[in-house]
Each structure stands twice: as C-alpha cells, then as structure tokens.
Amino acid sequence: MNELQKKYEALKEYFRSAGSAVIAFSGGVDSTFLMKVASDVLKEKAVAVTIKSAAFSNREYEEVLALCREYEFKNEILQADCFAVDEFVKNVKDRCYYCKKNFFTKILDYAESKNIGIVCEGSNMDDTGDYRPGMKAVAELGVKSPLKECGLYKEEIRQLSKELGLSTWNKSSFACLATRIGYGEIINKHKLEMIDSGEQVLYELGFKQFRVRLHGENSARIEIYTEDFEKLLENREYIVNKFKEAGFIYVSLDLQGFRSGSMNEAVKNL
C-alpha cells in the first residue's frame, strides 16, 4: 500500500470511528471528496450541509444541488444572513473569523439537533499558509478537519477524486464573494451581486480560473491566468459592456494575473 492509499484508508477509518458526520459542503474539490468518502462509509449517517448566503455565488449554489443529486448525497440547506454580522458588513481584517463562526454555529446546532457525532470542513495540508482567520473559528468551535488530520494535500485530493470518478477532481478553486472586496470597504448586497454578475460573464466565456476584485464602488480589477490575456482582449468589448450592465464603471485587467488571496497583500498595511 503506497503512502497516498494509506492516507485514504485513514480517512475512511476516521469516519468509521465517528459513526455519523455532517460535512460543511460547498461543492468544491475538497468538500466533495470529503463528502464522497463520508457517504461511502457512513451511508445515510453522512449529511452534506450547505449554507445559503449572499456571500456565495448563485452558480456555486446550483452546482451544490447538482452534485448532491449526481452522487446521491443526503443534503440539507441552511439559510444564513451574513449582513447580520456587523464585522462582515464593516469588512474588518478578521472578517472571515466572524463569518465562519456564524455559519459553523448554525451547522453545529443542526448536527446537535440530529444527534450527529461530528461536524467536518474541507481544509487540507495546503491551507496552513496565507492569511486565514476563519481557521481560528473552526478550531474554537471544535469543527474537525479530517483531510488535514490525515495529511492530505490538494493535489492528492484531486488524484483520489479522479480515481473515484468525481467530476470535481479538476474544478477550479473559488471562495466567498466578500474576498473580492478590500478590507475596510463596506460590504453590501449590491456589491456582491455586481461581483457575482461579473464573474458569471467570465465563467460563461470559458475562463477556468478568475476573480473580479471590486475597488471602491464601481471599479473592477479582473484576475485571470496570464496565458488567458489574449482571450480576454479578444472579448474585451463584450466584457466591458456586460460589466457596465452589472454596475461597474471602470474595468481593468490585473497584469500580474490570477493569484489566490490577492486582497491579503494589503493586510500588513492595515
């Protein structure tokens, strides 16, 4: 048995020992793999719980529902008002801590009401860097991170996902829409809807990885892979028109290209 297989077996044993589990399910690479393993081991005693909130794109929510149907995951949708969290609206530096605490408290309450043993989230070994205040909330609330505990890295999760036939094995990574807004800039529904609309345009054009960063009230900074610059310029007029329809006045391309967590580059200055 190779090292990766040992990790996979350890993950299955993790769920066997738990007896039942709730998986915080976003439909991404990590949570889909985690839910698939939990479901294979625990059957009906594994539940995929998704938070429906303005902080997440409509496209991702629809993908969650489609994945649950495709793999017959037992699922539950919980509503959450992110705007009820003052620190979220004010977009403080540790916004993610307060937001995660709000969401996971709801998930933990659900698990308790159903007498389910553990609540799990999909962080892996690659999620130990960058600026991640949300992980503090995960630790404080006692939410489990089985992928990390079993020593699994992102590329290993993609490999195992492919072997399991999961359509998400090569899915691009996305995050809460609030990560597109610079710390200290107020977050409201209109801004999140603008960002969601802009990113949907890029998605429909076939860009694999992208972010639409909002600066101020109406300036968009598009991040895509540098090798996709030519494609974007070929569609420049269409993109600009669609972004203006969404509410943007200024539309720019970041010459550094896509990089996850680019808004964190300014954290040290706060």
Image: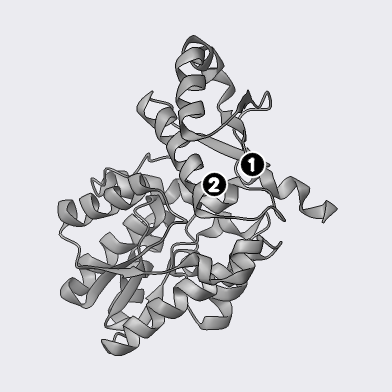
> Residue 179 location, x and y as percent?
58, 50
What scheme was used to colour the molecule? one colour
* Disc ID at residue 191: 2
* Disc ID at residue 60: none
**Point 28% across, 48% down: residue:** 63
> Tag 2 or tag 1, which sits nearer the N-term?
2
* Labels 1 & 2 near each other (Cβ < 8 A): yes
Which amino acid, mark 1? Glu
Which amino acid, mark 2? Lys
> Residue 136 location, x and y as percent?
62, 73
Residue 72 shown left or right of residue 131 in the figure: left
Nearer to us in this view, 208 or 93: 93
Residue 216 shown left or right of residue 192 in the figure: right
**Residue 2 visible, this orientation:** no
**Point 47% across, 56% down: residue:** 55
Label 2 element class: helix
* Disc ID at residue 217: 1
